[in-house]
Amino acid sequence: MEPILERSDTALDLSVILPVYRNAFTLREIHERIAGVCLPKGVRYEILYVNDACPEGSGSVLSELERGYPEIRVVSLAQNGGQQRAILAGLKQCRGNRAVVMDADLQDPPEAIPALLNHLGDGVSAVFAGRQGRYESPARLMTSRVFKTLLHLLCGAPKDAGAFVLMDRRMIDRVLAMDASSPFLVAMIACSGLPVRSIPVGRAERPDGQSAYVGGMRLQVALSALWWVLRWRTGFVRTEPDHLS
């Protein structure tokens, strides 16, 4: 059966949130592909690009897109805070009944959004696009698998979960009410206490440039995420919303 996006007549049905850092060459294409998914179904949607104080001309491209398309909003952060904080900033600003978070580098296919929506509901508050394929080097895939296995054992996050995820409003509010001193979206969703699921989605190789997460930065992010989960499980942190500018 063909995936269906249902239209809401009372509010925005969907917010698409994309943290942006060094993505100047992919921003126009990702917008066209998101519009190609939403417009034919008559969906009321918005696209929130979160400019994480990024260099290399991304800001000028975002300004051009925002002027040209009414569905686009740009949230600009004064200082670079990393992908996870950029995601939370977007979630705080989104107006949709549902929100999908995805990368802006074309590795996450917008064409998978209808399938994610088809699996949301019936008690399920978040649907992960389970990462499939050889989208990174073997070494990066192996270390990522180790990290995700540990995360699964600690908090029950799906082993294939990444930052491409659809959430309902209940999940959005639950995540925003959590401690965000060292945020990691996958762990926060898994620790929310709300039902989640994962469906397989092929992930593309990076078409341009390289990931901002290299070497020691990947290790730092992983250790920070695991530390957050341990603090949550022990009751050291609970619900203290972080006010992002």
Image (cartoon, rainbow, N blue to C red):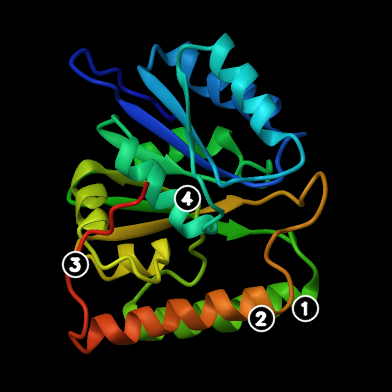
**Mark 1 or mark 3: which comes first in sequence?**
1
List the single residue furthest toward the front.
Answer: 78
Looking at numbered disc 1 in the image, what kind of residue is underneath it?
Ala
Residue type, numbered disc 2: Thr
The answer for how far apart the CA atoms under marks 2 and 1 are is 6 Å
Residue at the image position 42 percent from the left and 69 percent from the top: 158
Task: Give the alpha-carbon distance from disc 2 to disc 4, as whole Å.
Answer: 24 Å
Query: Label 4 belongs to which residue?
Result: 86
Q: In which quarter of the image is residue 114?
A: top left
Task: Tell us which disc is closer to us: 3 or 4.
Answer: 4
Residue holding disc 2: 143
**Which callout, 1 or 4, points at the residue further toward the start of the chain?**
4
Query: Quick one: 30 or 79, which is closer to the camera?
Result: 79
Q: Position of residue 127 (x, y in %)?
A: 37, 51
Look at discs 2 and 4 and give the one toward the viewer: 4
Q: Do the residues labelled 2 and 1 touch (CB within 8 Å)?
A: yes
Question: Taking 128 as reference, is 208 above or below it?
Answer: above
Callout 3 amino acid: Gly
Residue type, label 4: Ala
Disc nearer the start of the sequence (2/4): 4
Badge 1 is on which residue? 139
Residue bearing mark 3: 193
Dot label at residue 3: none
In three-dimensional space, the C-alpha distance between marks 2 and 3, rounded to whole angstroms, equals 27 Å
